[in-house]
């Protein structure tokens, strides 16, 4: 990788690590994981399912909070505090700046996911040791596959953050658009399926149908990364599926970064 | 008196007041929840998209709500009404739409539907849904078979599902015997024979194999006797009154011995049965 991009990624990563928000998010995720030690006992037999549900949800929630707060702030801080001028005065192109920032944010997400996964592994192990009888269907591989899929989603969302921070002028708008993309991305598949199933009953205008079709291609389908239910039941995912979501994640991020780069190179920084 | 000295006093008074208010609110809230308990669950058409990627944990939460609400009724020995049935059905449908593999939810609903609410059809419908997803879980067809046999007195379907359960990995060996016994009660000898032959192929244990062979032998004799009864009916245009009439008509040499030590008998409907009920006679 280009040394300049790498050094910018490392700076972004270090800047993120220093932010106290990260500790708050980590503490919150830890609390949810701790909750699984208590709540699991209320269920009948499928304690492994409940434990995995809570722990992977905590990892996801922690990761999302990090993107919505930390990633958005790290991107907008440079513009708000005008520190971007000092960066761009160096032999950096705007595209390199964006890519460097993106890799920094991805590194930050990776570190957070690794940390949270380590803690949730310990939590699951603790519950498993407490109720070994109810963990017969449990599969570690399925859990790690689900976490990996979540990380792929974080890559896409970080690219989305980069894109919106180049388009908008305020961090609040970036946050709003990123959250909207996340919600639409999570629900678009279900909405399309629902419409297809109910097609004869619901009379949709051609315009609405076209909008839904376009949305399907423009907005990332984030539900493809949701493997939590399968992981909770110890159902592993095929390598071809994992490969396909990995490619989807990388290509979508690359495309959106290219668009961000085009917009950013034409943007007037005042 | 300075303000700094007053602060601890005010704090203690505030804490006492807080405790009093909290206790009062707690009591009021209990009354409120008893009067207005939200015993409904939104259908999955709404809950599904709203839960986004947290469907698993939302299904856990909804299930916890159901077991707490209905568990309290079970604890108090309260009778279940139509409202409870509707609540349970809607909730379990939503929960299993969110997580279609959630066996605890299926089983909890099955138990309540069959034993407490007398809604066996609803239980079977739910188990059929579970069967689509938990394809390798012998418990799903086992409970289906049990419901048909025990609650609906439908031995044919009971045997069919228990046979299915016996073929799935992890199923206890006795399911095979149970299935043939059920099909025997249902007088479906052919089905029982085919099923047992398949089971022998997958069984390593010699003792169990011997057990199955004996059962096949008895079922085959009964099947052959029934064929002779049909032959007799074709020739004489009437049904024989007993199996000895088949001997008199020259269709068989003698009424065969039951390998279990009982006696084969002819029922009024033309089917052959044994007094041993396929249990070894002492």
Image (cartoon, grey):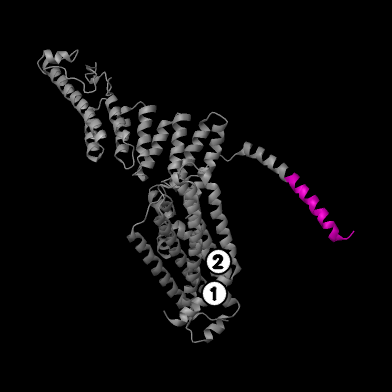
Kindly indicate whether the residues beneath marks 1 and 2 are on one polypeptide chain: yes
Q: Nearer the viewer, mark 1 or mark 2?
A: 1
Residue at 58 percent across and 31 percent down: it is B76
Q: CA distance from mark 1 to mark 2?
A: 22 Å
| Residue B169 as seen in the image, left or right of residue B23 | left
How many residues crowd around disc 2 within 10 Å: few (fewer than 14), some, or many (20 or more)? many
Residue A263 visible in image? no
| Residue A5 as seen in the image, left or right of residue A86 | left
Residue that lies at the very extreme toward the left in this rendered image: B250
In the rendered image, residue B34, in percent from the top left (x then y), is placed at 63, 36
| Residue B216 as seen in the image, left or right of residue A12 | left
Quadrant of the drawing holding the C terminus of chain B: top left
Q: Are marks 1 and 2 in contact (CB under 8 Å)?
A: no
* Disc 2 secondary structure class: helix
In the rendered image, residue A248, in percent from the top left (x then y), is placed at 38, 65
* Disc 1 secondary structure class: helix
Task: Work out whether B139 lies above or below B232.
Answer: below
Chain to which mark 1 belongs: A
Question: What residue is pinned by disc 1?
Answer: A14
Quadrant of the image occupied by residue A16: bottom right
Question: What residue is pinned by disc 2?
Answer: A175
Residue A153 colored in magenta in the image: no
Disc number for residue B50:
none
Q: Which residues are the magenta region?
A: B1-21
């Amino acid at each position: 990788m280009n040394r300049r991009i790498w050094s910018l990624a490392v700076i972004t990563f270090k800047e993120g690590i220093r932010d106290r928000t990260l500790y708050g998010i980590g503490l919150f995720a830890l609390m949810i994981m701790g909750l699984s030690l208590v709540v699991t006992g209320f269920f009948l037999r499928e304690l492994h399912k409940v434990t995995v549900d809570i722990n992977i949800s905590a990892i996801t929630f922690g990761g999302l909070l990090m993107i919505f707060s930390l990633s958005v702030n790290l991107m907008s801080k440079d513009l708000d505090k005008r520190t971007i001028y000092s960066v761009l005065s160096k032999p950096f192109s705007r595209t390199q700046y964006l890519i460097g920032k993106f890799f920094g944010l991805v590194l930050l997400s990776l570190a957070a996911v690794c940390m949270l996964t380590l803690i949730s592994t310990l939590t699951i192990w603790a519950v498993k040791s407490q109720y070994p009888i109810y963990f017969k269907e449990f599969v570690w591989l399925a859990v790690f596959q689900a976490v990996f899929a979540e990380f792929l989603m974080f890559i896409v969302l970080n690219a989305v953050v980069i894109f919106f921070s180049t388009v908008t002028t305020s961090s609040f708008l970036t946050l709003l658009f990123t959250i909207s993309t996340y919600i639409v991305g999570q629900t678009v598949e279900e909405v399309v399926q629902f419409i297809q199933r109910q097609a004869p009953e619901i009379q949709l205008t051609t315009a609405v149908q076209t909008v839904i079709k376009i949305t399907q291609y423009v907005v990332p389908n984030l539900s493809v990364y949701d493997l939590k239910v399968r992981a909770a039941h110890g159902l592993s995912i095929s390598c071809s599926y994992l490969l396909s979501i990995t490619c989807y994640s990388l290509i979508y991020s690359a495309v959106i970064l290219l668009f961000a780069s085009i917009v950013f190179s034409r943007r007037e920084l005042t | 008196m300075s303000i700094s000295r007053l602060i601890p006093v005010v704090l203690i008074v505030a804490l006492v007041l807080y405790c009093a208010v909290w206790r009062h609110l707690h009591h009021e809230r209990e009354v409120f929840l008893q009067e207005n308990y939200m015993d409904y669950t939104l259908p999955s058409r709404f809950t599904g998209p709203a839960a986004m990627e947290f469907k698993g944990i939302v299904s856990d939460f909804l299930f916890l709500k159901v077991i707490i609400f209905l568990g309290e009724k079970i604890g108090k020995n309260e009778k279940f009404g139509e409202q409870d049935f509707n609540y349970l059905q809607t909730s379990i449908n939503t929960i299993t739409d969110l997580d279609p593999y959630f066996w605890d939810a299926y089983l909890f609903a099955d138990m309540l539907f069959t034993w407490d609410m007398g809604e066996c059809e609803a239980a079977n419908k739910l188990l059929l849904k579970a069967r689509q997803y938990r394809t390798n879980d012998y418990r799903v067809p086992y409970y289906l078979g049990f419901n048909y046999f025990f609650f609906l007195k439908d031995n044919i379907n009971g045997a069919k599902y228990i046979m299915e359960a016996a073929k799935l990995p992890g199923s206890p060996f006795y399911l095979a015997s149970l299935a043939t016994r059920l099909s025997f009660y249902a007088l479906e000898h052919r089905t029982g024979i085919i099923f047992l032959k398949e089971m022998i192929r997958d069984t390593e244990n010699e003792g169990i194999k011997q057990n199955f062979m004996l059962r096949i032998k008895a079922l085959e004799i009964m099947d052959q006797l029934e064929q002779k009864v049909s032959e007799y009916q074709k020739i004489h245009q009437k049904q024989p009154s007993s199996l000895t009439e088949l001997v008199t008509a020259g269709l068989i040499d003698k009424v065969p011995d039951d390998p279990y030590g009982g006696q084969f008998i002819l029922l009024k409907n033309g089917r052959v049965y044994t007094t041993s009920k396929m249990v070894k006679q002492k």
